[in-house]
Amino acid sequence: MAVPNTVTARVGNQNISIETGKLAKQADGSVVLRAGDSMVLVTAVSQREPKLGFDFFPLTVDYQERLSAAGRIPGSFFRREGRLTERETLISRLIDRSLRPLFPEGYQNDTQVIATVFSADNQYDTDVLALTGASFAMAVSDIPFPFQFAGVRVGRVAGSFIANPSETERDQSDIDIIMAANRDSIFMVEGGGKEVDENTMIEALLFGQRAIEPLLQAQEQMAKAVAAAKRKFEKVPLAEGVAARVREIALERVRKAYAQDEKHDRYGQLSQIKKEVVLELCDVGRPYAGKEKDVKQAFEDLKYEYMRRMITHENRRIGGRGTTQIRNITCEVGLLARAHGSALFTRGETQGLVTTTLGTSDDEQRMESLKGQSFRKFMMHYNFPPYSVGEVKPLRGAGRREIGHGILAERALRAVLPADDKFPYTIRVVSDILESNGSSSMATVCGGCLSLMDAGVPISAPIAGIAMGLIKEEDKIAILSDILGDEDHLGDMDFKVCGSGKGITSIQMDIKITGVDKQILTSALAQAREGRLHILKEMAKAIATPRADISKYAPKITTIRIPVSRIKDVIGPGGKVIKDIIARTGATIDIEDDGSVAIASPNSEGVEQAIKMIRALTQEAEVGKTYLGTVRRIMEFGAFVEIFPGTDGLVHISDLANSRVKKVEDVLKEGDEVLVKVVSVDRSGKIRLSRKEALAEQGGGDGKHGGGQHGGGQQQAAPPSVPKA
């Protein structure tokens, strides 16, 4: 029976405790991480035998947040958590990307890591705890996982880096990245910034790598105390001589295949070579009969070895490109007549059709999380249909990869979107990948930016993205710009960088090897910047700045402000007034607590009519201003005149005319329209009006009665400058 063991570490201002041996003891590895009132349980289980029939490592990672952790009941019909949310999916991917490349090559045992949030104080994000906990769970288990790492979030407030910033600090930060690393290398990076320069981003990564030292020491301490004996694992070697024989038969043909520019031609040739090699070596009576799996693996190893040496030793890539060369780019905008914004971005054999749709506040996405209910005004959705790579698969909902790519592009573009009060639209951008040969997520970023500009969204700067790769063979290093799918799969580092001409807005990095130092990172990001600037120039040929006007098919939205004290007048009892405005104008009206009112309608006439009605309800009397009002009540001491709907004031009998008035009825009657001037407004809001002063300003005398509709006076029309009730 495991004995409970606890270690502690301090990262930034956060104290973290890690405990094992108390909860979930039947898992191969189990740890509980606590920070403040937050608690995350992370478990790891790996089957004892390999899963046959798979040519990849069957690892599953699930991060899940129990809403009870924040004292909430799910709002779904069944009142229980359902499928993983986008946030949970993204964090699951972060952990998976950190773990997967560190397992021993050839390990094919079904493995599952589950991180569950049981308590959350919402002062610090629990994603970093889950990421760090995954490595701790491996460290205390018998699973043959040879590395240890820790996770950290890095922010920067007022020019100073912060490890694991609080939620308040994150709101003020111009950098927000989460990373997994150990002393020797950074393995995974996800995040972005507000157009941050490359040197600052590198310093942030190195700062984060230094900040995890206490967690690495704690992990070593716990692993030593638990002293779990690791299972023995050795990769099954290929049959003797098979690698050399495959190389002898196939090398020259593989070399010719990799000289092909077209993906399908290249893949077709390689597939045919593979079939011929298998037939030659594995047919009945052949030397490797029954060893078809070994021959196929030897062929894949040959492809891997040849492509890497071709790049590092011959400075030549697939199709003959140089290491910094970017494939041909074409951009088009405005392809779809009814879409609010559209763009087609093509880079080599990767192509994305991206649309932008503008909506009202009613179109915001409602989200439920540990922090409560929130609303999302900008959505970026990425779709990867099977025809984009010439495959046949059933169409289902968005998978983890599609969600992850969408979030990456969303982060890249969000940094340059206008503030809500400047552009009060809900924005949905959808990228449909029509064909793919690497960098489809970066095509989504570029196409998304083009479609936003085509839709007339006033972004502060154009954004482009580029996928970079790295191959390290002994002492030779090659950094590749605009990588293909094969270069991504066979390389040592894959990193995507998005940003403007000024700096980085989004970055994603996965490193499969150790020894990637500051010099390599600096060179890689500098080369990525050159490529990004080149892509931005190509994009500018199609559209350089956002269109001046939004699409005629987009809803028209105007934002006005009303006094907070008058919000109740616009809404009315039980919403009666606002419902009437909506029914009469066809507009959608959204009122915020600060008095801002967003009015949307399919046409500008509906917006203008609604604004006019709201203005009439919320006008406030201005001292010294003359209004054309309507007499509502006659009293012995004067008359109450409504100067605009819901607002009236008193004209005292002494202010009706220059001459003495014996009876109010001699001058006015109910229903009369009359010019009045606002003399004063007291603290309680009572308005004093004067007909006498209004007539004097207009150059009129009393007549007998001075401007009523009866009794000898002649009704005066309101001059153009006088507001009419």
Image (cartoon, rainbow, N blue to C red):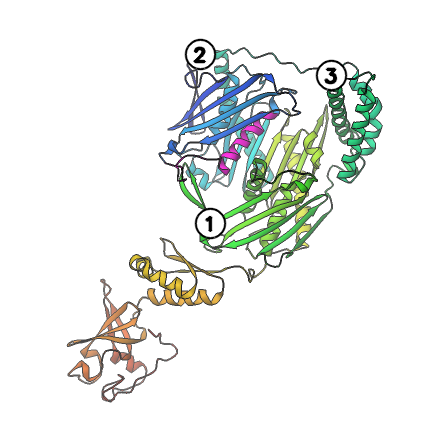
| Residue with the mark numbered 2 | 2
Check disc 1 and report its element: helix, strand or loop.
loop
Check disc 2 and report its element: helix, strand or loop.
loop
Residue 554 drawn at (x, y percent): 53, 59
Check disc 3 and report its element: helix, strand or loop.
loop
Crowding at dot 2, Cα within 10 Å, few <14 / some 14-19 / many 20+, comes out as few
- Say whether marks 3 and 2 touch (CB < 8 Å): no
Identify the disc placed on residue 364.
1
Identify the disc placed on residue 214.
none
Extent of the magenta region: 73-100
The magenta stretch spans residue 96 = yes
Crowding at dot 3, Cα within 10 Å, few <14 / some 14-19 / many 20+, comes out as some
Nearer the observer: mark 3 or 2; the answer is 3
State the CA–CA distance, disc 3 to disc 2. Answer: 39 Å
State the CA–CA distance, disc 3 to disc 1. Answer: 56 Å
Q: From this view, report whether residue 532 is shown above or below residue 638.
A: above
Question: Which of the pair 521/436 is nearer the observer?
Answer: 436
Q: Is residue 139 left or right of residue 680?
A: right
Q: Residue at x 78, y 29 (%)?
A: 313
| Amino acid type, mark 2 | Ala
Q: From this view, report whether residue 599 is shown above or below residue 677.
A: above
Residue 297 drawn at (x, y percent): 73, 22
| Amino acid type, mark 3 | Leu
